[in-house]
Image (cartoon, rainbow, N blue to C red):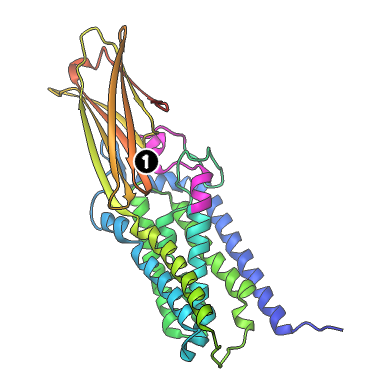
Amino acid sequence: MTTTDPIQTDYRKRGMLALAGIALVLILFTALVSFLDLDRKVSGLFYEPGQGFFLAEKEPWLWMYHQGTLPGVLFLLGGLGLWFGSYFYTGLIKWRRYMLLVFLTGVISSGILVNAFLKPYWGRPRPSEITEFGGEWQYHHAYSPGTPGQGQSFPSGHAAMGFAFVPLLFFRKKSRAAFGIGVASLGFGALMGATRVVQGAHFLTDVTWSAGLNLAVATALYYLVLKIPETPETREIQRISLLKKLIFGAIVLVLAVSVSSSYFSRRPFFETYKKLLKITPTVTELVVHTNFIPDKTETRFLPQEESRVLINSKGFGVPSLSLQVHPDSQREGNIHHIYFQVDISGKYVEMNHSISVFLPQSLEQRLKVRFENTKITE
């Protein structure tokens, strides 16, 4: 007859109750934000017609956008390194499961759930992509999935890395200093989330769910998977053969490269392409075709303005990343078609394009401008 350890059962119940509590808070918060329309109201504070999200390219928000994920990446790599070192240095054994908690939380929450699964497939347009803020797509609530690939707003990848220090909240019994750092780091995560809201890249609920997912994953790992409260510390160092050390080291190296590549492949990239247009007097409609879905489109009729098209491409990629724009044009009666094919070579993890058409004010009454997104075949 087997008996169940009451202490183990108690910790499992705590874990399940904690996960239920996190889920309940996220659901209630999302419902409240949706009912009060806070997602659009908060984002609207940083948007002005004609200017867009006016703080997007200003400091410190721009620096946070470019470099804000670095502390989280270094934190995860440090956890991986200490976990690996615990198999060779006796003094690190007591930290082994805690370091594994740090690394796995980041990989599962930020790497898998947020960036690999939810962002690409949830289909929630970013604030800058919805019609209320100058975009082309309809707004979606956080609980309402859209078309996969049509927007990558939910949840926030940057905020998820900002909250990478959440596992330190579970260090309370192990180290008060680490726990204190974990509490303080919540402010950094909030700042990272605020950055993305200010820039029109994410809604309030996108940031909240990034924090909640980190906390939920860390809770599940701590109580139910790694079972840290139930596992006694091992004082003796394990003997490992040279072959196993080499294999083990290779595995750690691969994991470290996979984690760090997500940062080092995120070098800021920005390029503007300009194309002058010749609009003949008989043209009544201008159609701009692209082989990509633009993040934003706009048409401006300005006094004494030359006819031109600007394509702004920005994102993150490897240093060798290059972008080429191939234009073409065609006339069909009174319709002037202009085609833009953007080809990108090199690895990139995020790339957004915006199109601006500037025309003389004298053409405003007779010229209609339309944008079409079609795959251009060679």
Q: Residue at x 39, y 60 (%)?
A: 261
Say whether residue 260 is left or right of residue 52: right
Say which residue appears at 41% left-offset and 84% top-offset: 177
Q: Is residue 253 left or right of residue 32?
A: left
| Amino acid type, callout 1 | Ser
Q: Is residue 247 magenta?
A: no
Asked if 159 appears above or below 374 in the picture, the reply is below
As drawn, the residue found furthest toward the front would be 243
Badge 1 density bin: few <14, some 14–19, many ≥20, Cα 10 Å:
many
> In this rendering, does residue 114 appear at all?
yes
Q: Secondary structure at mark 1?
A: helix
Compared with 231, 120 (above or below) is above
Task: Determine whether, in the image, residue 143 is placed left or right of residue 224.
Answer: left
* Left-right relation of 279 to 149: left
* 376 and 3: which is toward the camera: 376
Q: Of residues 241 and 257, which is closer to you in this image?
A: 241
Q: Residue 295, how many percent across, how many down?
A: 36, 37
Q: What residue is drawn where x is 54% and y is 90%? A: 237
Quadrant holding the N terminus: bottom right
Q: Which residue is mark 1?
A: 128
Q: Residue furthest bottom?
A: 235
On the image, the x and y values in percent for residue 319 come to 28, 53
Question: Which range of residues does the magenta coloring cover?
Answer: 116-138
Whether residue 212 is visible here, answered yes or no, is: no
Above or below, 231 relative to 115: below
